[in-house]
Image (cartoon, rainbow, N blue to C red):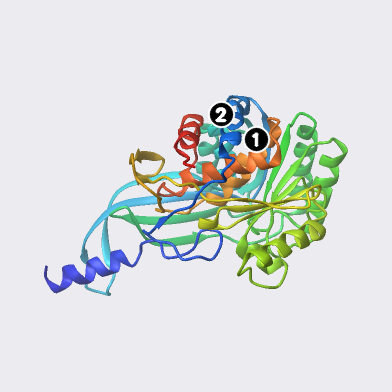
């Protein structure tokens, strides 16, 4: 190996995932191991019977739509201009990101999904609408606005590793006429929905007043609302059926880090009061998730799954049998998966604890996939069968 090959290898290696999944715990190619509760035998029969009931539920998704664009290529040499790899372009693909990924997750499990949001009228907005149609998602609630910029996240991938991401976006509030049109379509559709998912990525769509109007309308129609909040809003989601956030977000809300079980317990109880909601779910990466319900004096701790999956391309799986622990490959969209599966399971009649176990299992599959991905019924059923006591 010559010096240039060695440098190139180090540069590409440095692009491997080195961030966190939900909780602030470093991840990469290490394996995450955990045991499910000893009463898992009580969960599995109910969860397996639940999966077919997910199909056909009418789910609405309101939030910040994004287009995830992937540029695929190969990298065998360094640029003479800087110590960066030269990526030879091979192909381009696009899929739904942000709130659109939540909708895609719901659609993949057989739900009837209606999307509500705002996009620009440019090429990216048209590409996003095409992605919605490809997933079978109803898009009549997606309002084009010629003066709005569609959020696009472009990832350059070489050797199945992300080299760099380029974001194109502006965080602007909706114009009054666009907001009026969006709310009109949403309020008309609410009465036919089994549940509404509010996916806030802080891109300007959702303001305090906007969220308050949506939750008030949903409450009057007895439509449960499931929310992934952003840290810029603390009281905008009062009355939600469940708030889903990661440990870092939860720590921000309660103004302290969650370093041990006691701090997580205190944060969960505090957030129930802060949000005035029925339940709070805190996702914690390799520690699974903690579920707090207003009606229960004790919280439920759900450990992470305990089998390994490796993936080579977006949305394409390759399960390695007999492995122990999970190979974390990419955490893109794991939180979206938890939010979507949790809300859909509750809409299908599951208790919140059962829904949380199912959502945790689904997220465990998604983190084994490269890029924005979803999980289908067969994958989810197989993942349940692979859970070990």
Q: Is residue 154 above or below residue 80?
A: above
In-image side of 254 versus 369 (left or right): right
Residue at the outermost left position: 2
Residue beneath disc 1: 345
Real-space Cα separation, disc 2 to disc 1, in angstroms: 11 Å
Work out whether residue 273 or residue 173 is closer to the camera in this orientation and state it. 273
Which residue is painted at 51% across and 54% down in the image? 152
In-image side of 100 versus 6 (left or right): right
Q: What x and y, as percent, mark residue 300?
A: 67, 50
Q: Quadrant of residue 15?
A: bottom left
- Residue 218 showing in the rendered view: yes
Q: Quadrant of residue 342?
A: top right
Which residue is painted at 57% across and 46% down in the image? 37
Q: What x and y, as percent, mark residue 94?
A: 44, 44
Which residue is painted at 30% across and 65% down in the image? 13
Residue 79 is labelled as none
- Residue 141 showing in the rendered view: no
What is the secondary structure assignment of the residue under circle 1?
A: helix
Q: What x and y, as percent, mark residue 309?
A: 38, 44
In-image side of 133 versus 114 (left or right): left
Q: Earlier in the sequence, mark 2 or mark 1?
A: 2
Residue beneath disc 2: 48
Report crowding for label 2: few under 14, some 14 to 19, many 20 or more residues within 10 A (C-alpha): some
Which residue is painted at 49% across and 61% down in the image? 167
In-image side of 133 versus 217 (left or right): left
């Amino acid at each position: 190996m010559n010096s240039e090959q060695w440098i190139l290898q180090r540069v590409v290696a440095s692009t491997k995932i080195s961030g966190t999944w939900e909780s602030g715990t470093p991840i990469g190619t290490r394996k995450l191991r955990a045991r499910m509760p000893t009463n898992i035998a009580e969960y599995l029969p109910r969860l397996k019977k639940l999966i077919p009931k997910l199909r056909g539920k009418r789910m609405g998704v309101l939030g910040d739509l994004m287009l995830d664009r992937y540029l695929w290529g190969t990298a065998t040499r360094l640029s003479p201009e800087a110590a960066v790899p030269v990526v030879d372009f091979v192909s381009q693909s696009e899929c739904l990101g942000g709130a659109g990924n939540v909708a895609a997750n719901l659609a993949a499990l057989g739900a009837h999904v209606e999307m509500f949001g705002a996009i620009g009228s440019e090429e990216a907005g048209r590409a996003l609408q095409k992605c919605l149609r490809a997933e079978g998602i109803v898009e009549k609630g997606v309002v084009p606005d010629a003066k709005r910029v569609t959020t696009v996240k472009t990832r350059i991938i070489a050797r199945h590793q992300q080299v760099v991401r380029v974001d194109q976006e502006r965080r602007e509030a909706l114009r009054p006429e666009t907001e009026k049109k969006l709310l009109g379509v949403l309020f008309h559709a609410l009465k036919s929905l089994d549940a509404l998912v509010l996916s806030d990525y802080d891109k300007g769509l959702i303001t305090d007043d906007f969220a308050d109007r949506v939750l008030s309308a949903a409450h009057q129609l007895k439509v449960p609302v499931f929310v992934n909040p952003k840290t810029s809003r603390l009281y905008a989601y009062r009355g939600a059926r469940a708030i889903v956030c990661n440990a870092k977000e939860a720590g921000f809300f309660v103004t302290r880090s969650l370093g041990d079980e006691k701090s997580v317990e205190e944060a969960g109880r505090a957030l129930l009061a802060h949000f005035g909601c029925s339940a709070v779910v805190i996702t914690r990466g390799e520690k699974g998730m903690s579920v707090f319900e207003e009606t229960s004096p004790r919280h439920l701790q759900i450990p992470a799954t305990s089998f390994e999956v490796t993936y080579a391309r977006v949305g394409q799986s390759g399960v390695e049998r007999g492995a122990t622990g999970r190979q974390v490959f990419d955490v893109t969209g794991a939180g979206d998966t938890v939010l979507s599966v949790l809300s859909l399971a509750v809409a299908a009649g599951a208790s919140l604890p059962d829904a949380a176990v199912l959502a945790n299992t689904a997220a465990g599959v998604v983190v084994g996939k490269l890029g924005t991905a979803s999980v289908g019924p067969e994958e989810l059923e197989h993942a349940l069968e692979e859970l070990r006591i």
